[in-house]
Amino acid sequence: MTSDDRYQHVPVIWGSLGTIFGVVVVLLATAVAALVTDPTAFEDGEIVVLSGRDDSIGGQRQALIDQWNALHPDNRARIVELSELADAQRSEMLARAQSGRGEIDVYNLDVTWTAEFAEAGHIKKLDEPRPQTDGFLDGPLATCRYHGSLWALPFNTDVGLLFYRSDLVPHPPATWEQLEADVQRVREETGNAVDGYAGQLADYEGLTVTALEAMWGAGGSVVDDEGEVVDGAPFQAAMAGLGRLRAIAPAGVPALDETESLSLFRSGRALFMRNWPVAYRSLTQDAEGGSPLQIGVAPLPGQLDVLPGKGVLGGQNLAVSALSTRPRAAQALIEFLTSERSQQLLFERGGLPATREVVYFDQGVRDNHPYTETLRDAIDDARLRPVEPHYARFSEVFRAAVEGYLRRGTEIPDGFPEQLAHALQGRSAPPGEG
Ligand code: GLC
């Protein structure tokens, strides 16, 4: 190699070193950037959950939030609690969503609003990352889906159950005919001191639920499983069920919500009560030391001793707000609140029905809560209200007529099925009827 050759190599060596240095710098910068914008890292800040009242015994939802906060000091969560009534909760949640202010991260939605919030773009699909859904009960999980996508995870499920005075009714009625006969018998035996079936009969979502169950119990319906409004024989049977509800309601058809139905039943003045499972825990384990009454719990009656009764499948679903600035943290909170452990605590301590199947198989749970199997069967047999974005409008039109019929003796209007069909489509009334 000549001296000229050596001098010619110097720039080549410097050039190579420069290239290596450049590559190292780029790699380092990429690694640092990846650390800063880790696509799976939680965004900092408080997670705000908008929810209806915590009906669990001993505030178990808040207890879980406290656990989350201890584990996630950078993403503490806070529940903003709304009214106890479903309709008022919906109005407030919609108003906040429509305000566009983005102050809410998680909505705790009634199962009947999931479609509405999804359709309106107020909530975000749960697809990045996709949560694990194995192990949830099918019915509650189905209420989280709309148009094939997953929009929420089920926080607690719910189903209509029959509570009865076991001192006056030795065996729970298997059919609605038997239930009506029990009501008549006990009215006569007690001179009307113990009277009727205390459903949720006030003018709000609870009345829609109570009336639908009475209609299904007569083999009728007003909407089929595809959300199409029915007419003809099923509709006539539904009207017969409504007639029976008027006959078995306590005298004067009192305007009761869930809490008031429970008070009436607890006072010993109602023979039967239709309510959600949490009522069972509060009747048997409340702070006042439980009910002095002898009570039993059973599925709602069915038909002709053959078909099981069908309660409405209720419950609440947790969804991430489309405007949340911390969607990953919000989704992680939702996964925590719907995990097997959280679901077991909510059921065992709080009386809110779990959405995870394993909880119902847990021997400890079954030993301590003998009604676990009754509850599980009722959930499996339960039926959904229409899964439609305009469900709330449907429910308003439906119960306006039902309320008039039950409490004021007005007839169900002609063209009721058509009115319901229009309401489900988001229209106010059939053409020509204003
Ligand atoms: C319960 C149910 C819910 C239902 C409401 C009616 O909260 O979980 O699905 O709509 O009661 O009052």
Image (cartoon, grey):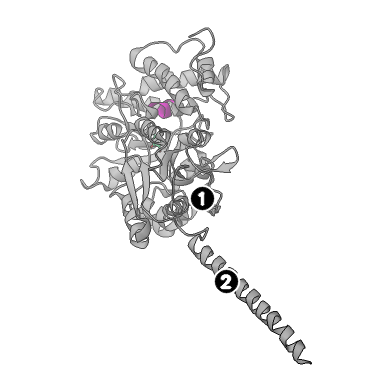
User: In the image, which is nearer the foreground, mark 1 or mark 2?
Assistant: 2
Mark 2 CB within 8 Å of ligand 1: no
Q: Where is residue 24 drawn, in percent x and y?
A: 59, 74
SS for dot 1: loop
Q: Residue at x 26, y 28 (%)?
A: 194
Q: Which residue is located at x 29 percent, y 35 percent?
A: 259
Q: Which residue is mark 1?
A: 136
What residue sits right under mark 2 in the picture? 25
Q: Is residue 146 above or below residue 371?
A: above
Crowd band around label 2 with a 10 angstrom C-alpha radius: few (<14), some (14–19), many (20+): few
Which of the two discs, 1 and 2, labels the residue nearer the N terminus? 2
Task: Place residue 87 in its image quadrant.
Answer: top left
Which residue appears at 36% of the width and 47% of the height?
48
Quadrant in the picture for the N terminus: bottom right
Tell me the SS state at disc 2. helix
Taking the spot 31% from the left edge, 35% from the top edge, the residue there is: 83
Residue type marked 1? Phe
Q: Is residue 363 above or below residue 290?
A: below
Question: In front here: 174 or 138?
Answer: 138
* Part of the protein shown in magenta: 207-211
Label 1 to label 2: alpha-carbon separation: 48 Å
Whole-percent x, y for residue 241 in the image: 46, 22
| Residue 253, image quadrant | top left
In the rendered image, the residue lying farthest to the left is 288
Whether the residues at callouts 1 and 2 have beta carbons within 8 Å, the answer is no
- Residue 341: in sight, yes or no? yes
Residue located farthest toward the right when viewing the structure as drawn:
1
Q: Quadrant of ligand 1?
A: top left
Predominant secondary structure, magenta span = helix
**Percent of width and height locating residue 200:** 35, 29
Q: Is residue 1 above or below residue 316?
A: below
Amino acid of disc 2:
Val
